Amino acid sequence: MRFLAAFLLIATPALAAEHFDFGAPAAASAATRTVRVEIQGQRFVPSAVTVRAGETVRFDVVNTSDTQHEFVLGTAAQQKAHQAEMMQMAGAGSMDMDDDPNAVTIPPHAEKTLTWHFTRPATLEYACDIPGHYEAGMHGALTVSSR
């Protein structure tokens, strides 16, 4: 496990710049489980997911809508901070979050994958923080239970 963590930090220096106390990005090949999340209009299906601490989950996010969306993992406080960042980015004309290790931007009628290793129990959300989307209901509950 230490080797994998060290490898991820060396192989992907951009990922090392941001720390998440609930886990870290992982290679898709390390996933022990796959969860399909579908974007239908302004909502995620399923609206709630439970994973276990120690589990590496590959989220296959499918956008069936005609609008660009994002899929962001984080605490409620992190989502709120990201919403403020997205509001500033919207004013600058760019809202692509693929450089963030805990987020992917999904164009209309496309699919993206985000793989995450969860390290501890936590109450999280997955959300679309594009201005107005979270408020329209684009968020789901992500519970990380103990092993």
Image: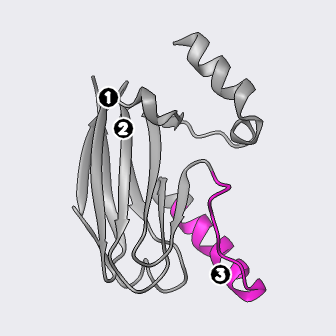
Q: Which mark is residue 100?
A: none
- According to the picture, the residue beneath numbered tag 3 turns out to be 87
In this view of the protein, can residue 119 be seen by the observer? no
Residue flagged by tag 1: what amino acid is it? Thr
Span colored in magenta: 79-100
Residue flagged by tag 2: what amino acid is it? Val
Q: Earlier in the sequence, mark 3 or mark 1?
A: 1
Corner quadrant of residue 14: top right
Q: Nearer the viewer, mark 2 or mark 3?
A: 2
Asked whether, in this view, residue 49 is left or right of residue 60, the answer is left
The secondary structure making up most of the magenta span is helix
Given residues 91 and 13, the one toward you in this image is 13
Q: At 62% across and 59% down in the image, what residue appears? A: 98
Q: Residue 92: x percent and y percent?
A: 78, 84
Task: Identify the secondary structure beneath mark 2.
Answer: strand
Q: At 37% across and 85% down in the image, what residue appears? A: 136
Q: Are marks 2 and 1 in contact (CB under 8 Å)?
A: yes
Based on the picture, tell me whether residue 78 belongs to the magenta stretch. no
Q: Nearer the viewer, mark 3 or mark 1?
A: 1
- Does residue 99 lie above or below 95 as drawn? above
- Does residue 57 lie above or below 66 as drawn? above
- According to the picture, the residue beneath numbered tag 1 turns out to be 32
Q: Residue 52: x percent and y percent?
A: 29, 31
Q: At 66% across and 20% down in the image, what residue appears? A: 7
Q: Which mark is residue 57?
A: 2
Categorize mark 1 by other alpha carbons within 10 Å: few (<14), some (14-19), many (20+): few
- Does residue 103 lie above or below 107 as drawn? above
Residue flagged by tag 3: what amino acid is it? Met
